[in-house]
């Protein structure tokens, strides 16, 4: 990596769909605990000729993964129009990891599989955002706190 700047979150591509900044929201006041619901944020950009849809997601670390509106109400698939950035983030539609099966601390990585109507599936290793109140979040290789240059 040699000092390259890495944007926070996992970045990937499946078919023509670019995936950026995929991450679990920062734990509010300590780790996400077993039984908690943890928000999952991600941006998509569809470079294809046809619209696609995010149909859903799954992970072994939660009993469910739902696409929810800003208010937490479960909704249907998210349309990914061509040539347009779609941001699933706080205050908007996003994914919710429901009823966590284990504790997740800031900086921990988990696998999440995203399913698209056209592009298919992709498994991503995503991290839980490192809390800003932690000075040295982790000494695991490849993980740096967001303030690191």
Image: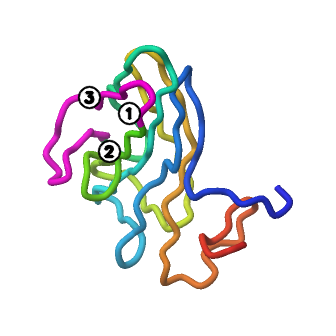
Mark 3 or 1, which is nearer the eye?
3
In the image, is 128 to the left or to the right of 78?
right
Judging from the image, what secondary structure is the residue with disc 1 in? Answer: strand
Residue 56: percent from left, percent from top: 33, 30
Q: Which residue position holds label 3? A: 77
Q: Residue at x 42, y 70 (%)?
A: 31
In the image, is 97 to the left or to the right of 124?
left
Q: Residue at x 43, y 62 (%)?
A: 103
Q: Which residue position holds label 1? A: 57
Residue 34: percent from left, percent from top: 34, 60
User: First in sequence: mark 3 or mark 1?
Assistant: 1
Q: Which residues are magenta?
A: 64-84
Q: Is residue 68 magenta?
A: yes
The answer to whether residue 116 is above or below residue 26 is above
Judging from the image, what secondary structure is the residue with disc 3 in? Answer: loop
Who is closer to the viewer here, 146 or 86? 86
The Cα–Cα distance between marks 1 and 2, rounded to whole angstroms, is 8 Å
Who is closer to the viewer here, 61 or 42? 42
Who is closer to the viewer here, 1 or 47? 47
Q: Residue at x 29, y 31 (%)?
A: 78
Q: Which residue position holds label 2? A: 95
Who is closer to the viewer here, 86 or 3? 86
The answer to whether residue 71 is above or below residue 135 is above
Crowd around label 1: few <14 · some 14–19 · many ≥20 (10 Å): many
């Amino acid at each position: 990596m040699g000092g390259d700047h890495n944007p926070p979150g996992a970045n990937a591509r499946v078919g023509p769909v670019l995936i950026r900044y995929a991450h679990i929201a920062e734990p509010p006041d300590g780790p996400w605990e077993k039984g908690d619901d943890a928000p999952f944020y991600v941006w998509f950009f569809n470079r294809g000729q046809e619209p696609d849809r995010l149909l859903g997601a799954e992970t072994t670390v939660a009993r469910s993964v739902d696409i929810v509106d800003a208010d937490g109400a479960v909704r249907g698939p998210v349309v990914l129009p061509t040539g347009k950035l779609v941001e699933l983030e706080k205050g908007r539609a996003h994914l919710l990891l429901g009823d966590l099966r284990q504790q997740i601390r800031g900086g921990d990585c988990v696998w999440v599989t995203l399913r698209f109507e056209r592009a298919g599936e992709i498994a991503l290793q995503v991290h839980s955002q490192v809390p800003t109140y932690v000075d040295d979040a982790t000494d695991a290789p490849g993980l740096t706190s967001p303030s690191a240059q």
